[in-house]
Amino acid sequence: MEKILKYTYYICLGLFCVFVFYMTSVMFLSPRQDALKRGFIPCTEALVNNLTYCQKGKIFCPLQYLGKDLVCNTKVVWNGLILWGKGVQKTPWNNYLYTPVIVAPTDDELEYTGNPASDMAAIERQHNFIEQKHRELEDAKMRALQLEEKRLINDPEAVLPTAYFSNKTKETEDKSEDIQDESLIEKLDIPLSAEVKGKQQKNTNGNILHKINKITEEKLQNGELKDE
């Protein structure tokens, strides 16, 4: 029983090492650019797009999407085996080791020799792929806007210092206009210039003379004083 467990362990470990070596080799040899977006290219583009979800300092987020990328690449290899078994392609790796098409042929003088059904299916796949990439681009833009809004909410002073200080300046100016009472100025112990002190003294003397004239007038009316 112990030998069976050891053999099983070594077989699983060997298969895993062969799988990792094979995946590394074929991904290294596979084309990076292709007008038809075949092979591992869609998986790589999806990985790059998904990594925009991850924020700085998050370790498990990129690991999660790297795992999804590994699953996607494994499906490409598995689909190649299935297509080869069905006789659709000559070898199991034709769907990811191929001659890349950088620029699609656009010569109108060449006669059409293709299969309309397969060509329409290829056009439909390309149309769906373009729509998917468009949706992913819109999602990426929305995520960028949401991250920007979160940053502004967490640090509002980084974008509102001008309005904040302008409001403070306006409030200070309004308060300075309200300081008109002389007694309030005395309590604040604000040093006044000679001209301002002279005006205050003049206003005080005028008030005293007004009070004396008023008292004298009242006493004359009451007969307490005689007008000589």
Image (cartoon, grey):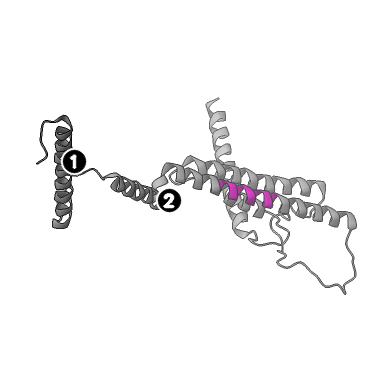
Residue 213 rendering spot, x and y as whole percentages: 16, 41
Disc 1 crowd, CA 10 A, few/some/many (<14, 14-19, 20+): few
Residue 145 x, y percent position in the rendering: 55, 48
> Residue 159 vs residue 169: left or right?
right
Q: Position of residue 26 (x, y in %)?
A: 63, 55
Q: What residue is drawn where x is 89% and y is 58%?
A: 115
Is 44 in front, or is 94? 44
Look at the numbered disc 1 and give the secondary structure of its residue: helix
Residue farthest to the front? Answer: 228
Q: How far apart are labels 1 and 2 at the CA level?
A: 42 Å
Determine which quarter of the picture holds residue 104. Answer: bottom right
**Is residue 37 in view?**
yes
Which amino acid does the dot numbered 1 rest on? Ser
Is any part of residue 54 visible from this angle? no
Task: Give residue 87's mark.
Answer: none
Towards the viewer: 218 or 27: 218
Residue 74 in the magenta stretch? The answer is: no
The residue lying at 83 percent from left, 73 percent from top is 107
Up the image or down, 221 lies above or below 24; here it is above
Depth order, front residue of 156/5:
156
Q: Which amino acid does label 2 sit on?
A: Val
Residue 183 image label: 1
Give the x, y percent position of residue 32: 63, 61
* N-term-proximal mark, 1 vs 2: 2
Q: Residue 159 carries which label?
A: 2
Instruction: Report the magenta residues as a range.
Output: 132-143
Q: Does the magenta stretch include residue 135?
A: yes
- Looking at the rendered image, the quarter that the N terminus falls into is top right
Q: In which quarter of the image is the C terminus?
A: top left
Q: In this view, does 214 lie above or below 131?
A: above
